[in-house]
Amino acid sequence: MKNLGILLSGRGSNFEAIAKNVLAGKIPARIAAVISNREEARGLALAREMGFETRYVPSQGKNRETYDQEIVALLKAFRVDLVCLAGFMRILSPAFIREFPRRILNIHPALLPSFAGLDAQKRALEYGVKFSGCTVHIVDEGVDTGPIVCQAVVPVKDDDSEETLAARILAEEHRIYSEAICLMLEDRVGIVGRRALRKK
Ligand code: GAR
């Protein structure tokens, strides 16, 4: 059985969706650890309540390399095979990424490469796109730039607020993150150039 390591900073609804699928046997893995840079993250409390191993790793007074070394050491101690960023609001250092080559996934609330970075739903709404969505990608050394494993499209309605659009996108996030995790765990993703292609 492969081990997942979840990194989160906030609400943790993506973690919750993944955890439910793990517990229901729909994802062939176990959750080895849930780690947060925020002590007050709802996702961390939820993970604790669900009985998972949790760790709070504060970042104050540490540079990115030192911080990332701590996280990497924890992930290795928990024998994590696949790292899932689930609303983890930190950029990973190249050294971190090199420790888990092609074994870190991220979920982003837009159709990348559109609206990379923060406040993606707000910027999509303000820009006036008619469709947005979400993307699960393999993390590389850029910000939201790695090979795309799964995407889902969501319509933008004329009367959407940032909240209603974000909620519609989130429902799709919860679906495609588990799908992408399964593809990765089953080694059904091959990388050709910057494309993540499904192996036959
Ligand atoms: C999700 O919408 C996720 O796509 C986004 O943060 C939210 C976390 O929600 N991530 C990013 O914007 C990363 N750049 P959650 O804590 O309920 O899973």
Image: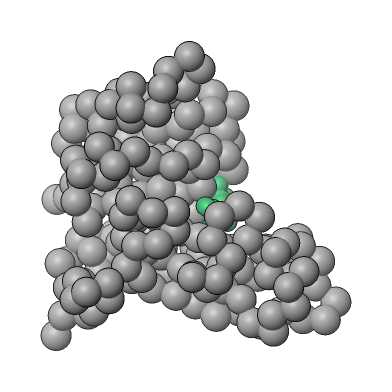
Query: In the rendered image of this protein, does residue 169 appear above or below residue 131?
Result: above
- Which residue is drawn at the image coordinates 58% and 65% (left, top)? 115
- Percent across and percent down for residue 146 are 34, 62
Which of 181/130 is in front?
130
As drawn, 89 above or below 127: above
In percent of the image, x 44 and y 58: which residue is there? 144
Residue at the right extreme? 159
Percent x, y of residue 152: 49, 77
Q: Residue at x 49, y 33 (%)?
A: 44
Point out the residue furthest to the top here: 61
**Of the pair 184 and 116, the residue shown nearer to us:** 116
Q: How is the image coloured?
A: one colour
| Rendering coords of residue 106 (x, y %) | 40, 55
The residue located at (57%, 39%) in the rendering is 10
Left or right for 172, reference 81: right
Q: Residue 95's quadrant in the figure?
A: top left
Residue 81 relative to residue 113: left or right: left
Left or right: residue 144 versus residue 156 is left
Q: Is residue 200 visible?
A: yes
Q: Is residue 124 above or below residue 49?
A: below
Quadrant (top left/top right/bottom left/bottom right) for the C terminus:
bottom left
The answer to whether residue 54 is seen in the rendering is no
Q: Is residue 114 above or below residue 18?
A: below
Residue 187 in the image: state x and y as whole percent: 15, 67
